[in-house]
Image (spheres, rainbow, N blue to C red):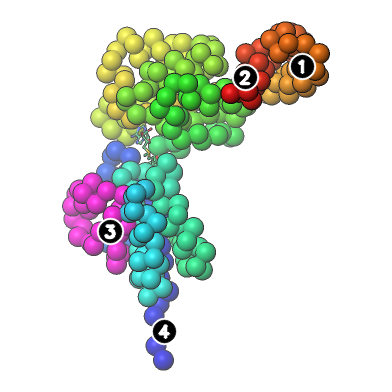
Amino acid sequence: MSTSPPGCLHVVATPIGNLDDLSPRALRCLAEADLICAEDTRHSQQLLAAKGLKRPLMALHDHNEESQIATVLERLQAGQQIALISDAGTPLISDPGFRLVRAARAAGLKVSPLPGPSALIAALSVAGLPADRFAFEGFLPAKSSARRERLQGLLAESRTLVFYESSHRILECVQDAAAVFGAQRPAVIARELTKLFETVLDGDLGRLINALQADPNQQRGEFVLIIEGAPEDADAALREGQRIFAALREHLPASKAARIAAELSGAPRKVLYSAVTDESA
Ligand code: SAM
């Protein structure tokens, strides 16, 4: 009785700009893969062509991932080596692949990482902001009201915050962040990393807004926005403010309760008050 060698789903990081950042091991894995699942096959074809590779590609993106899973699992079960790549960077990180990886693991199949570029790690490595504890928040909502609400929820977060952003919204996004966190909060914009127009702007949110407005070219390309976390005691102040607010609200109108709770705790009045308006919305 012959048994086929075990199949493996290789999750392969690809460059975020500079094609030389494809590791030798990633190159070998792609060259030997029976199949490469790619977010956009035309885009990935260019990477393969630049590296002199010709391998079968299968599209696997947000809109067809679920329906492709059965086929990929069957091929893995038959012993095939399958690579998963996205358009740039590490698959699954604000990119497709999560459902496939979950299904492969649930089926007891081998899933192996081929680590390499990721914009968030590249940005953190040069930002000069604390990188020992950070919260990756991916893309913020496109609408300003939803974006501010998401940012409000992060007001007391003491870990460094990391966001992805595209050129259409970078200015609005930094403006909203300044409105919520204050213009003095230290922040960094890492733009077009590893590419020709790589720029890392630093300072505080107010300064970043000025820099983006002063030079519209700074609003072009791909961005990672990194914002320093709130001081540790902001978290404690918010919890204390919420506790006082909850007690006062039994006896006072919400706006008055929020004002007193803010005064006593040091937590922002708006945030305490918005908890009630959100509840009643
Ligand atoms: N999976 C990718 C990774 O590991 O970084 C991220 C994919 S996500 C769809 C694309 C976003 O990543 C861009 O909108 C931008 O925010 C960020 N990004 C990708 N390449 C970048 C680069 N060269 N410089 C700065 N940000 C980049």
Q: Quadrant of the C terminus?
A: top right
Give amino acid for label 4: Thr
- Residue labelled with disc 1: 249
Instruction: Answer above or below: position of 146 versus 175.
Output: below
Q: CA distance from mark 4 to mark 3?
A: 26 Å
Mark 2 CB within 8 Å of ligand 1: no
In this figure, which residue is indicated by the disc labeled 4? 3
Q: Looking at numbered disc 2 in the image, what kind of residue is underneath it?
A: Thr
The reply to whether the residue tagged 3 has its Cβ within 8 angstroms of ligand 1 is no
Decide which of tag 3 and tag 2 comes sooner along the chain: 3
Depth-wise, is mark 2 or mark 4 nearer the camera? 2
Q: Are marks 2 and 4 in contact (CB under 8 Å)?
A: no
CA gap, disc 2 to disc 4?
Answer: 63 Å
Looking at this view, name the residue that lies furthest to the bottom.
1
Gap between marks 4 and 1 measured at Cα: 69 Å
- Residue at the far front: name it: 280
Picture coordinates of residue 67, whole percent (x, y) = 36, 59
Q: Which residue is mark 3?
A: 58
Q: Which residues are magenta?
A: 32-59
Q: Which residue is mark 2?
A: 277
| Labels 3 & 1 near each other (Cβ < 8 A) | no
SS class of the residue under badge 2?
A: helix
Q: Residue 245 location in percent, x, y?
A: 75, 17
Left or right of 101 in this view: 242: right
